[in-house]
Image (spheres, rainbow, N blue to C red):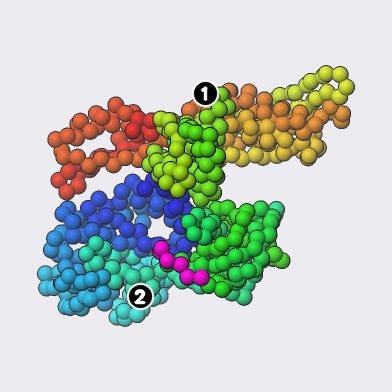
């Protein structure tokens, strides 16, 4: 669900491989596309599983077409369904050219029959096996060589080629079944072992030296390397207290040992180490490279921090989380609730980086913000259930943002103040422009560039200009909403030996930014929802009219299983 994108983001950051599960009826849904893009960002090799093929309206081949069209992916079909909807019996294994069927009601799907491919599917199976070999040969040189020479490829050679191409993220194997009826799950688990990477298959993890981002440090996935791990999740256990989930990339982690949190610059003592098995846990004495474990006893570590060897420090790539899009005011009902609310908010914000808290300066109210209404409802419910907080929650408010559309160059601002004795003096000349991520074409966040030469602004004052600009961005020039996606460049300036100070340059940077932003065509940004509506043909006009009345932008209309499917972008405030 879009409201819990943080769980997807941090999972993909530490996983070596993934299985993308698609609904055989709905195909590739809007949120599937979002999660797929997140997996692309972390270059996670993945397989596809087309699920729910026993449901009315399920269409395996339509789903494969959608994987190509919407995800811009290269699917490698390894299985074909036998039967459809209520008559779904099993799958054709195109690698081994055999049929796997589940005819009886099996407990967990482990018992299946290996049979000859049904005569009515033989031609289709041969056609798709030829497609499999063609697609695979385009992605793997070894397979191509034998395929072009007309050599017969063994099952082992094909499986090895699929593994190489999957690990290189050149294609995505596609399997199918119905998990609810336990049909197709066993071959899927076998395929996970055959085609997805083990921790040893992953390339060496890259990080950088503490306070030196340009100095790259690598760690091989080996127990003999210096210890390096990433804390990716904080969870509160009712019996154990705070648990920190870590992915070990190199070296060994031992209970009772001491490690360095290289992001915070503090040493942490490892309490107990637990291997987690869903809702069960097993205490272990030590853990090696490639493992994911939960650790007790870490006091200062938060999501995204690096834990490493005291003598060989490294900082690993952290995670980036989207900014909250909706916020509500929350008021405790009694004085005792006030204290409990503070504790609850602290604990929950430790666990969830997309949950933020602030105080409204005008009203004094506590404002909590998150990724959507459901996200905040779940968090407020947890406050009541786990922390016994009775609170009144206001109406949700959309979190708008501001940005600029035009570049403003060499805007000058001079801050002067004379009050007797030493005064204040700082002159800055800045340029501001929209900050765009070249790879994605979306917002690139905030950037600051120092283009000053010849000591016109002393080095110790430059961070103050940066700080002043960032503080100005907290309250935009249009409606006071935070500003995003702006690049600020300090071009030149002037200082006074006596009257210049960090404060003076901070004020100058702040005011220069505000003036420049007003000239840079400021614009208001609002969160948009990607919406998919399925409707009978007769109601299509009504649905489109409703979406238009909500300021929606229709992106696509198509027929699917006799119904019309409309994809649109709609402002969150209108939902």
Q: Which mark is residue 159?
A: 2
Q: Quarter-wise, where is residue 131 in the image?
A: bottom left
Task: Answer yes or no: is residue 554 visible.
Answer: yes
Q: Quarter-wise, where is residue 125 in the image?
A: bottom left
Closer to the N terminus: mark 2 or mark 1?
2
Horizontal relation, residue 396 to residue 81: left or right:
right
Q: Give SS at disc 2.
A: helix
What percent of the width, then of the height, locates residue 108?
A: 26, 70
Q: Give SS at disc 1.
A: loop
Viewer-nearest residue: 474 or 275: 275
Residue occupying image coordinates x 66% and y 57%: 262
Residue occupying image coordinates x 47% and y 46%: 387
Above or below: residue 521 compared with residue 282:
above
What percent of the width, then of the height, locates residue 137?
A: 35, 70
Residue placed under numbered mark 1 in the picture: 479
What percent of the width, then of the height, locates residue 328?
A: 45, 33
Segment colored magenta:
278-283
Horizontal relation, residue 238 to residue 473: left or right:
left
Residue occupying image coordinates x 52% and y 29%: 365
């Amino acid at each position: 669900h879009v409201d819990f994108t943080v769980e997807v983001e941090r999972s993909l950051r530490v996983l070596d491989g993934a299985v993308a599960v698609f609904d055989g009826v709905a195909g590739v849904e809007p949120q599937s596309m979002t999660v797929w893009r997140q997996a692309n960002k972390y270059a996670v090799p993945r397989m596809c599983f087309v699920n729910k093929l026993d449901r009315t309206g399920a269409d395996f081949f339509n789903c494969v077409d959608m994987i190509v069209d919407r995800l811009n992916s290269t699917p490698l079909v390894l299985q074909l369904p036998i039967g459809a909807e209520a008559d779904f019996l099993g799958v054709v294994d195109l690698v081994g050219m055999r049929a796997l069927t589940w005819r009886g009601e099996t407990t967990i799907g482990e018992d299946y029959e290996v049979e000859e491919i049904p005569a009515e599917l033989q031609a289709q199976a041969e056609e798709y096996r030829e497609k499999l070999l063609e697609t695979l040969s385009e992605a793997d040189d070894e397979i191509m060589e034998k395929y072009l020479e007309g050599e017969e490829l063994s099952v082992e050679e094909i499986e090895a080629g699929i593994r190489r191409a999957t690990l290189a993220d050149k294609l995505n194997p596609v399997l199918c079944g119905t998990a609810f009826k336990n049909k197709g799950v066993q071959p899927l688990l076998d395929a996970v072992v055959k085609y997805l990477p083990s921790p040893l298959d992953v390339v060496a993890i890259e990080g950088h030296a503490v306070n030196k981002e340009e100095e790259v440090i690598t760690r091989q996935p080996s127990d003999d390397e210096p210890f390096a791990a990433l804390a990716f999740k904080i969870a509160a256990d009712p019996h154990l207290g705070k648990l920190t989930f870590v992915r070990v990339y190199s070296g060994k982690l031992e209970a009772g040992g001491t490690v360095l949190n290289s992001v915070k610059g503090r040493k942490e003592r490892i309490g107990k180490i637990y291997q987690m098995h869903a809702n069960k846990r097993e205490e272990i004495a030590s853990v090696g490279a490639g493992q994911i474990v939960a650790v007790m006893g870490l006091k200062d570590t938060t999501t995204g921090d690096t834990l490493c060897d005291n003598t060989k420090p490294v900082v690993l790539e952290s995670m980036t989380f989207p900014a909250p899009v909706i916020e509500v005011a929350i008021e405790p009902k009694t004085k005792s609730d006030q204290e409990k609310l503070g504790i609850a908010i602290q604990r929950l914000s430790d666990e969830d980086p997309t949950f933020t808290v602030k105080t409204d300066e005008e009203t004094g109210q506590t404002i909590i913000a998150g990724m959507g209404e459901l996200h905040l409802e779940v968090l407020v419910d947890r406050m009541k259930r786990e922390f016994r907080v009775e609170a009144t929650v206001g109406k949700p408010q959309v979190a708008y943002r501001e940005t600029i559309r035009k570049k403003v160059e060499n805007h000058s601002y001079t801050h002067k103040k004379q009050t007797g004795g030493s005064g204040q003096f700082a002159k800055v000349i800045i340029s501001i422009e929209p900050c765009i991520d070249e790879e994605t074409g979306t917002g690139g966040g905030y950037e600051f560039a120092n283009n000053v030469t010849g000591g016109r602004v002393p080095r110790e004052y430059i961070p103050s200009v940066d700080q002043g600009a960032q503080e100005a961005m907290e309250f935009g020039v249009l409606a006071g909403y935070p500003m995003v996606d702006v690049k600020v460049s300090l071009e030149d300036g002037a200082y006074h030996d006596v009257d210049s100070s960090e404060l003076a340059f901070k004020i100058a940077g702040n005011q220069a930014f505000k003036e420049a932003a007003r000239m840079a065509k400021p614009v208001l940004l609002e969160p948009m929802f990607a919406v998919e509506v399925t409707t009978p043909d007769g109601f299509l006009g009504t649905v489109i009219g409703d979406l238009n009345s909500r300021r929606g932008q229709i992106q696509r209309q198509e027929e699917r299983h006799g119904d019309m499917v409309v994809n649109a972008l709609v402002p969150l405030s209108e939902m």
